[in-house]
Amino acid sequence: MYKWFVGLLVCLLFVSGCAKTVTSIVTYGDQMVVEVTLRGTMEVNANRYFMVLASDPSFKTPLPPPDNISYEFLEPGTTPMLGAIADYYTNYYSTWAGYIMVEPGGFFSVAGPFVSGVVATRESFSSLGEITSKITYNFRLSRIFGGTIPSTIYFDVVSVPWPTDQPKLAADHLTSTNAYISIVAGSTVPVSDEENTSLDPATDILKCTVSIQ
């Protein structure tokens, strides 16, 4: 009887131990690291470089010609030379969570939501550093999304020629449908874009790699 009881107890302990599950801990990151590769050297005096961020895959940006010849790629609050400003907010800006802009003064983050008549606030987070064919920077996602960062972030990178007193139409952007990333720490997404020799090399995007830390 005693041996039978001991055997039963050992069996129950074994089954109980096997029933335990190992729970993995997922770590989420708030730091986004970006590297954009151009065919030529970045030229911030002649061009502007944007990264638009969104929490919804249906977000929209003004595309390069010939897909779009009616809307410029401008910052919210800028008066366009083409189209009605109300259409920019309805069709584009209202779908953005925010954006990063690279210009002669350095790297700037601008958080939404973007509402007509409300001035968007730029926040500088880095100087230009060395000028090469790679645009590299990192920033806190909370700069764009505040305290509620979505589990998946959608993005597009756009190069825009910046002529004086002329419409500013996008030149190139990421045409891949895989331009999104999970905020799980360690996530990395490389997005390739086809070479377009009809573009100025400084606006021709070849690749973008985004990582979360």
Image (cartoon, rainbow, N blue to C red):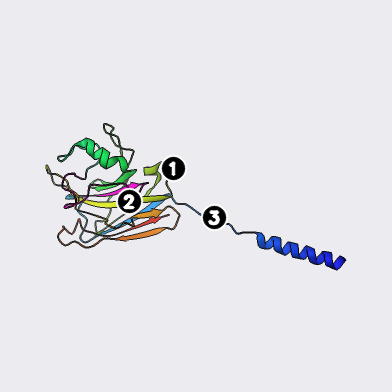
> Of the residues under marks 3 and 1, which one precedes in the sequence?
3
> Of the residues under marks 3 and 2, which one precedes in the sequence?
3
The structure residue drawn at horizontal position 51% and vertical position 54%, both measured from the top left corner, is 26
Quadrant in the rendering for residue 3: bottom right
On screen, residue 85 above or below 131: above
Q: What is the spatial separation of the Cα atoms under label 3 and label 1, in whole angstroms?
A: 20 Å
On screen, residue 103 above or below 130: above
Task: Indicate left or right for 67 with 35 as reference.
Answer: left
Mark 2 crowdedness (10 Å alpha carbons): few <14, some 14-19, many ≥20: many
Which range of residues does the magenta coloring cover?
48-72
Identify which amino acid the numbered label 1 is placed on: Thr
Magenta run includes residue 94: no
Identify which amino acid the numbered label 2 is placed on: Phe
Magenta run includes residue 61: yes
Q: Tell me where residue 160 appears, x and y as whole percent.
A: 20, 50
Mark 3 crowdedness (10 Å alpha carbons): few <14, some 14-19, many ≥20: few
Mark 1 = which residue? 148
What secondary structure predominates along the stretch shown in magenta? loop
Identify which amino acid the numbered label 3 is placed on: Ile
Which element is circle 3 on? loop
Q: Tell me where residue 39 appears, x and y as whole percent.
A: 21, 61
- Residue 25: numbered disc: 3
**Outermost residue toward the right in this view:** 1
